[in-house]
Structure formats: structure tokens, C-alpha cells
Amino acid sequence: MATILEAAARILETQGLQALNTNLVAQRAGVSVGSLYQYFPGKDALIVALIQRERSLLLAEAEGALQEPTGRNALRYMIAVAAREQLRRPILARLLDFEEARAPIAKELAPTMAPFVDLMQRIMTRKDIPPQADTDAAIHDLANIMRAMVDAANERGETNSKVLEERVERTVFGYLGVVSRTHRA
Amino acid sequence: MATILEAAARILETQGLQALNTNLVAQRAGVSVGSLYQYFPGKDALIVALIQRERSLLLAEAEGALQEPTGRNALRYMIAVAAREQLRRPILARLLDFEEARAPIAKELAPTMAPFVDLMQRIMTRKDIPPQADTDAAIHDLANIMRAMVDAANERGETNSKVLEERVERTVFGYLGVVSRTHRA
Amino acid sequence: MATILEAAARILETQGLQALNTNLVAQRAGVSVGSLYQYFPGKDALIVALIQRERSLLLAEAEGALQEPTGRNALRYMIAVAAREQLRRPILARLLDFEEARAPIAKELAPTMAPFVDLMQRIMTRKDIPPQADTDAAIHDLANIMRAMVDAANERGETNSKVLEERVERTVFGYLGVVSRTHRA
Amino acid sequence: MATILEAAARILETQGLQALNTNLVAQRAGVSVGSLYQYFPGKDALIVALIQRERSLLLAEAEGALQEPTGRNALRYMIAVAAREQLRRPILARLLDFEEARAPIAKELAPTMAPFVDLMQRIMTRKDIPPQADTDAAIHDLANIMRAMVDAANERGETNSKVLEERVERTVFGYLGVVSRTHRA
DNA sequence: AATGAATGAGTGTTCATTCAT
DNA sequence: AATGAATGAACACTCATTCAT
């Protein structure tokens, strides 16, 4: 199963979305298509599993944010994790973000997002973070903002993650109405 | 030609991306496939044309931003335009954003983006906007942030564009390092 | 009409058989498809007319063979004409030979061949040419032999028509059972 | 695979070149198009395979020519083989000759021709065959002459292969500058 | 006579999925 | 459980031909 997922990941990285088909994945994984269908009920399930595999790494790392003393630091931690994670296998990450938006994939993925939302919820109710009118909306906004910015940086070929993180932080804190120390007009 | 584009738009809105095929578009437009190919050299060209049709409305409206006295107001104007435009035909807009990311589409679309980048450039060099290290990168970041937020709002079914705009403004100003008057901690 | 035929000829020469379609021919000729169909009832008719145009030049020149004193000289004359004619627009000639073999084309072309067969008949009954068991078969054989050799020379990029003619003569005389003076073992 | 090739062969024989399409071949072979594409990467590959199937019989038989004591006899043997082979399935043979001339097919087929060229080379360097200025050119000329004559005989509906062979022999020996015993003027 | 937009059957090819072994 | 040959609906695209203007 891991072999199959990794084969799919590599195809995405080297040949792109349109080259991802079940026959090729099976061949590259060194198994038969039949076996692939024994593990995954369909192509979408394969993609979902791949997204979950990547997300689980992110979630595992993200949990460290809770150790941070302040909400701001926790957010900075989250941003750093997200940037690092996205830059680990940038092409793969961008393509999976892309696929994640497709309705049937998103539906399947919804439950997996719960722990992440939970984590964010706990961070955003810290005392130093201004209360948001709609916390849930805020969480989704933040996730999307971070994703959009990191993807865009990827696409432009940026490699300096520090500079990127700094920009994301400014944006996120701007969104939340936190006046960051760095940029005071 | 307009009929064909509108047919494509309606298919996207009612049946989604995977239902968009040249034969169906032609049929829904009440023309033959051959006619479709007389107007558009291929499927991608059709999508590109559809994106351009939608974008042209946005660009036309966006130009009004230059009338605004300050950079901040110009940005607010732009955000309002983008939000309104995206909420006009939300499903269509989101799917086109999606398609726009596909390499062959993006390549074809690149020249069309120039006037928009130009416009943003002129806004971002206003005196009340802090100078950015890399203006071009900033423009793309902002475009992506705005798009991501509005798409996400769409997906969640938000309809109140005022609330959305306010959130986007905070984010954009945060990104640029502008301390907005509204939220001072 | 001549313009249309010439346009077709040029397409064949520059883009090959598969690029020859009525719409392109019309466009290159600077007329509408409708006009093309006013002159030629269909695509095949266009090809037939083009073959006839080329053949008529050959026939006109070939008639000079009758002035030759001996049968051998008349044949040499014919061979020279065929080689020269085929090498005038070699690519076109080869492709038309190719098309000529297609059943519907050949059927249409049959009557046009009559004067040529007649001419050959008169040459082959000269006294210095050994009588053939089946004159008609011989004529067709000779035509095909000549065509095959000149086409092959073309394909190999031969440009020296003298050398080619000499080879063809040997072959033709060999076929007819004429012992040529040049090669006596 | 053999079934598919035979289906293609029969379509060519009964309905001609223009009726040869992958869907029909699959249907006649009693398999799905998908299966056809599992064995042959494309339509051209199918045609190439069919030509090779037919040619392989010819080559196998042609090798017997090397047993002949003299070059002349070896050539006679070759001619007999070619004539017999072409007359086995005359329509098919003629259409395949036709297709063989198409650039993409010829390219694919080039390596297959090597053993045949080799064989001819060995025959043409026998002592009783006059040395040719360009052996390679001579081989191609002879192949084309033989093909053209046998195809033409086919087209005229000749069935007596002895008469045909005799005519081809005369031509080939004429080409090579061999004075055949049969026709001395 | 000329135009050229419109037609639509036809073609090569792909690929998710199934199922007999 | 594993295999992989087989399936066939689906799709992008072409082009000879027609016909209203």
C-alpha cells in the first residue's frame, strides 16, 4: 500500500496530474492493477489516501504548536510547519492542493480535517489572539491564505523559507487584527 | 461564439468540470462540434476564452480603482470588485480559477494578465502603501490571497460580501504592512 | 480552376498527401470551398484532374517519339521524356503515382490512358522491336517499370537523369528481348 | 494477436484501405478496441506488423535462393518466390505494398528490410552477375521493378505465374546487363 | 456564380474498472 | 490475495460536403 502511494506520488512529481492513471501507478509500484483495486476502491480513493498520508505528517508536526506559550508563537510555529512541509516535496504538495479542491475528493477528506480544525481552534482562543466573529470561517480562511501563499512562492521558485514565513506571518496577523511588532507604520 | 461560451459556462455551473466536453458544449449551444472547432481551435482555447470573458468584466470594473484618492482606498475598491465579480457567478468563477492553474491554460492566459498587473503596480506605488521588497511577487501573492479567500467563502456558501470584503482587506493590509484604522490592538 | 489545381499541387509538394483536404486547397487557391465544388464534384475529381494535367504534358511531349526512325530510338525518346517529366516536379509526381493506384481514381482515369496506350502500340509494332506475346500487357509492364525505376531514383535523391535513363533503357530493352548494343556479356 | 492481424488482412481484402480502422478491426477480430491497443501501440503499428507477417513468409522462402549454384538461378528463384508470394493473397499484397510506401510505415519497417537486402547482396556478387556501379541502388531498383510488375499483373488479373515470372526475369536480367539465354536477338 | 459558415458521421486513442484464472 | 488481459464508453478532433445568402 505504501509502495502504491509512493509510486503515485512520484508520477505526480515527475509527470504531472494528467499522467496519473491507475495502470501506470500499479506498474510503477510493481504490482498489478488488480492489487491496486484491492487496496483502493477507485482512483479517487487512491488520491484521498495520498493526501491523507501527506497531511498526517503535517498534523503530527503541527501538534507541537500547542507547547508554545502564546497564541502568536503558536501561529508562527504552525506557519513554519506548513511552509516546511509544503517545501519538502513542493510539486507534489501543490498538485495535491489542487486535487483536494475537487468536490468528490473534498467530500471524502472532510472528516480528516477535524483534528486540524480542532488544533487551530485551541490556538485561536488563546488570550493574545483577538476573538474572531466566526472562528470556523477564520480557520478556513487562514488555512487557505497560508496554502495560497506557499503555493505561489513555490510556483515562483522561492526557496528561502524564512522570507516566506515572515510574509505569511504578516498576512495572518493582519487577518486576525494582531498588530505585529515588526511593521508598525 | 457567445452562445458556445455561455453553454460551456452553464455546463460548468450545473455539472462541473468533468462534464465539460466539446461534444456536450456544442450540443447545448445548439451547434455542431464542427462549428465549435471553427471558433475555438481546441478545448483549451474554449476554456481560455471563457476565462477571458469573465476576466474582462473584472478588469473593466477594476480600472475604476485608479480614481480613488489613496492607495488604501484603491485596494479596497479592487477587493470589492473582485468579491462582487466572484460572487456574481460563484460556481463558475471557482471552477475557472481552478482551470486557470493548469499549465497549458496559464501559458495562454499570461498576456491577458498584463493589464491587471499594470493596474496593481500603479496602485502599489502610491505613497500610502509601504514599498515592497519585490513588487511583482507581492502582486501575485495578493492576487492569490484574494482569490483563495473569496473561493473559500464561496465554497462555504457565504453570501454577505461586506463581511468577506472586510476580512480580505485586513489580510491584504496585513500583508502589505499597512496598519488599518479599523483594528488597532 | 488552374489556380485550384496548382494550389493542390503545391500542398502535395510541401505538406504531403495527408495534408491535402478540400478546405485547405480552396484557401490556398484564394477561393471558397463552394467554388471548388462548383468546378470539381468531389475531392477525387480534383485529384483526377491534377493527374490529368500532369499527364497531358507528358503525352504532348511523348508524341515526338513518333518522329524517331527506329522503334529503339522511339523508346529511348519515351524514356527520356518520362524521366524528365517525373524529375520536373519529383515529389508531386511520386505522390500522384501513388494516388493513381487507388481504385476510384484509377477507374476515372482509365479513358485518359487510351492515347498513351495507342502511342506505345504504334512504337511497339515497329520492325526492330521483337513482337510480344501480349502487347497490351507489355505496354502496362513497361509503363510500370519506368515509373517504378524513376520513382525509386527520386526517393534516393538521384539527380543525374542521364545515368537513370541509361538504366531504364537497359531494363526496358531487356524486357522486350532487344539486345542493346551497350551491354553484351 | 494473430486474430487481430488476420481480421485486418481480411478487411483490406474485402473492403479496401479506407475501410481499415481500428474499431472495425477489433470488432471483426472479436475483441475490444482496448485489446487491440494492448497489442499494437497504434494503427500504424498494426499495419507494420501485418506487413512484417507477410514479408516474413517471403524472406523464409527466399533464403532457399542461396542454395542455387549460379547467380542467375538464384535470381530466378527469388523472382519465383516473390511472384508466388504476391499471388497467394494478391489484393492484400498489393495494398500492403501501397502502405509500405507511406513515410511513417517505411521508417518503422526499415530494420526489417536488412536481411532481405543482405540476401540480395550475396546473390548479386556472384561471379555470373555483372558488377553494378551501385549495388545498393541496384537492389532497390530490382525490388521496385519486381514489385511493380507483379502488382500490375495482379491488377490485370493475371493468374499464370509462369508467364509473369518469365517476363520479370527478362526485365531483371536486362537491368543487370545479363544476356539471358532465352532471348537472343 | 461565389461564398463560407455549418454540419456530423467518423476516427484514433485513453483509461477506470472488472473478473476469470 | 494477486494477476493482468480484456473491456468499451467516452472524448478530442477532422474534413468532405451542403446550402442559405
Image (cartoon, coloured by chain):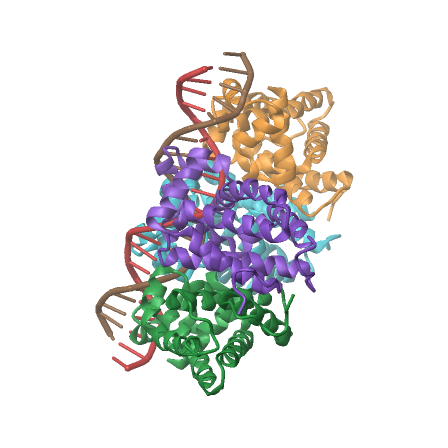
Chain colours: A green, B purple, C orange, D cyan, E brown, F red
Foreground: D32 or A185?
A185
Q: With C80 as the anchor, is B184 left or right in this view? A: left
Q: Nearer the viewer, residue A28 or D28?
A: A28
Q: Position of residue A82 (x, y in %)?
A: 51, 75
Query: Does A123 sit above or below residue C140?
Result: below
Residue at (73% x, 41% y) in the render? C164
Q: Is residue B35 visible?
A: no
Residue in the image at 52% along x and 75% along y: A79
Counting from the top left corner in percent of width and height, residue E5 is at 48, 27
Position of residue C63 in the picture relative to residue B164 (left or right): right
Which picture quadrant has residue D129? bottom right
Where is C55 relative to A2, above or below? above
- The one of C102 and B182 positioned closer to us in this rendering: B182
In-image side of B54 versus E17 (left or right): right
Residue closest to the eye, B109 or D57: B109
Q: Position of residue B82 (x, y in %)?
A: 50, 49
Residue C132 position in % (x across, y down): 56, 32
